[in-house]
Image (cartoon, helix red, strand yellow):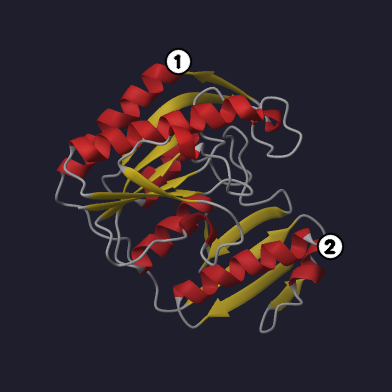
C-alpha cells in the first residue's frame, strides 16, 4: 500500500497567525516548522501501523521548504522545494493507494483560520461553477490520477468543506476556528495522536473511491482587483468575462489545474 501525503501549515494545531507561517521574516516560523513536522510524522506513523509499504510526503506550504528533513520519520520520503509542476500535489501518480492532506485550511471567504485559496490575490475560485479551495482542487487532481483522499486535518471549517466533497473521509479537527486569526486548539500532542489514529483507521477501510473528475474543466478565478486579473489574462486561451474575473477551460482536469496555478502566479506578479 503506497500512501501520499500533502502537507500544508495553516491548518496545524496551534497556528493562528501569518507570523507563524511566513517563510521569510515570520517571527514564529521556526516553531511552526516543528509543529508541522510533528503532525506529518504522526500521519506517517499511522500509515505504517496500517501496513503502508511506502509513504511519500510533499511539502505543500509556501516555498515548500518547511518540513525538517532531519526530523522526518524514517518510513517516508520527502519532496520539497519549488517550483514544482504539480505544486501542492507534486509526486502524485496512479501508483498510490490513498492520499492524506495534513495541516490544510479552508477556502477563501470562509470563516476558517487563515482561510485563503493559494494567495491573497484570489477572492473566489470555481471549477465548473463549484466554489472550492485548495482542498477541492487537490482532491480533484488526486481523483484524476485515480487516488482517493481518505483523510484531512485542520479546523472545523476545513473538515466541513471536506465532508461535503469527499464521501466517508476521515476529517480530523485539531482546532476550532473562532475567526480568521483566532482558534481554540487541541494540545499539539493530542492533535498528533488523533491524526495517527485517524490515518490508521482510514487506511483500514476498503470502500474508498477516487473523486469523480469531469472530462473537461473550466476554472474561474475572481481576483481582488482589476490589475491582478489583467496580469493573469496574459495566459494564452484565458478569457475575461469582467474586469476582475479570468476563466480557462482545459482539455482535461490536469490542464485546468496547471492553468489555475499559472493564472494565480501571473496575478501575484503584478
Q: Is residue 11 left or right of residue 44?
A: right
Q: How far is the residue under mark 1 from the one under mark 2?
A: 40 Å
Residue occupying the point 69% across, 53% down: 123
Quadrant (top left/top right/bottom left/bottom right) for the C terminus: bottom right
Residue occupying the point 25% across, 40% down: 47
Q: Is residue 237 left or right of residue 171?
A: right
Q: How many numbered dots are placed on residues in this image?
A: 2
Whether label 1 touches label 2, CB < 8 Å: no
Please tell me which residue lies in front, 53 or 261.
53
Tag 2 secondary structure: loop
Residue 12 image offset from top left, x and y in percent: 50, 31
Residue beneath disc 2: 270
Residue beneath disc 1: 187
Can residue 220 be seen in the rendering of this structure? no
Q: Is residue 80 above or below residue 155?
A: below
Residue 122 image offset from top left, x and y in percent: 69, 54
Crowd rating for badge 2 (residues with CA inside 10 Å; few <14, some 14–19, many 20+): few
- Residue furthest front as drawn: 70
Residue occupying the point 32% across, 23% down: 193
Please tell me which residue lies in front, 125 or 147.
147
Residue 258 image offset from top left, x and y in percent: 56, 70
Q: Is residue 9 left or right of residue 101?
A: right
Q: Is residue 158 above or below residue 227?
A: above
Crowd rating for badge 1 (residues with CA inside 10 Å; few <14, some 14–19, many 20+): few
Tag 1 secondary structure: loop
Q: Is residue 266 above or below residue 40?
A: below
Q: Tag 2 or tag 1, which sits nearer the N-term?
A: 1
Residue 151 sits in quarter: top left
Residue 268 sits in quarter: bottom right
Can residue 166 be seen in the rendering of this structure? yes
Amino acid at each position: 500500500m503506497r500512501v501520499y501525503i500533502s502537507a500544508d501549515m495553516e491548518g496545524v494545531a496551534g497556528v493562528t497567525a501569518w507570523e507563524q507561517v511566513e517563510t521569510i521574516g515570520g517571527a514564529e516560523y521556526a516553531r511552526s516548522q516543528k509543529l508541522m513536522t510533528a503532525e506529518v510524522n504522526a500521519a506517517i506513523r499511522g500509515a505504517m501501523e496500517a501496513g503502508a509499504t511506502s509513504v511519500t510526503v510533499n511539502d505543500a506550504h509556501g516555498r515548500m521548504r518547511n518540513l525538517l528533513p532531519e526530523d522526518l520519520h524514517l518510513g517516508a520520503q520527502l519532496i520539497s522545494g519549488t517550483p514544482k509542476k504539480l505544486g501542492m500535489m507534486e509526486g502524485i501518480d496512479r501508483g498510490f493507494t490513498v492520499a492524506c492532506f495534513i495541516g490544510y485550511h479552508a477556502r477563501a471567504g470562509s470563516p476558517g483560520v487563515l482561510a485563503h485559496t493559494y494567495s491573497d490575490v484570489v477572492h473566489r475560485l470555481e471549477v465548473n461553477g463549484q466554489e472550492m479551495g485548495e482542498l477541492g482542487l487537490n482532491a480533484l487532481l488526486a481523483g484524476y490520477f485515480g487516488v482517493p483522499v481518505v483523510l484531512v486535518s485542520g479546523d472545523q471549517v476545513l473538515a466541513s468543506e471536506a465532508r461535503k466533497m469527499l464521501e466517508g473521509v476521515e476529517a480530523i479537527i485539531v482546532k476550532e476556528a473562532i475567526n480568521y486569526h483566532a482558534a481554540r486548539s487541541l494540545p499539539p500532542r493530542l492533535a498528533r495522536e488523533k491524526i495517527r489514529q485517524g490515518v490508521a483507521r482510514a487506511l483500514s477501510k476498503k470502500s474508498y473511491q477516487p473523486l469523480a473528475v469531469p472530462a473537461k474543466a473550466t476554472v474561474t478565478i475572481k481576483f481582488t482587483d482589476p490589475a491582478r486579473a489583467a496580469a493573469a489574462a496574459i495566459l494564452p486561451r484565458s478569457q475575461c468575462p469582467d474586469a476582475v474575473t479570468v476563466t480557462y477551460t482545459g482539455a482535461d482536469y490536469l490542464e485546468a489545474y496547471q492553468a489555475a496555478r499559472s493564472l494565480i502566479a501571473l496575478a501575484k506578479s503584478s
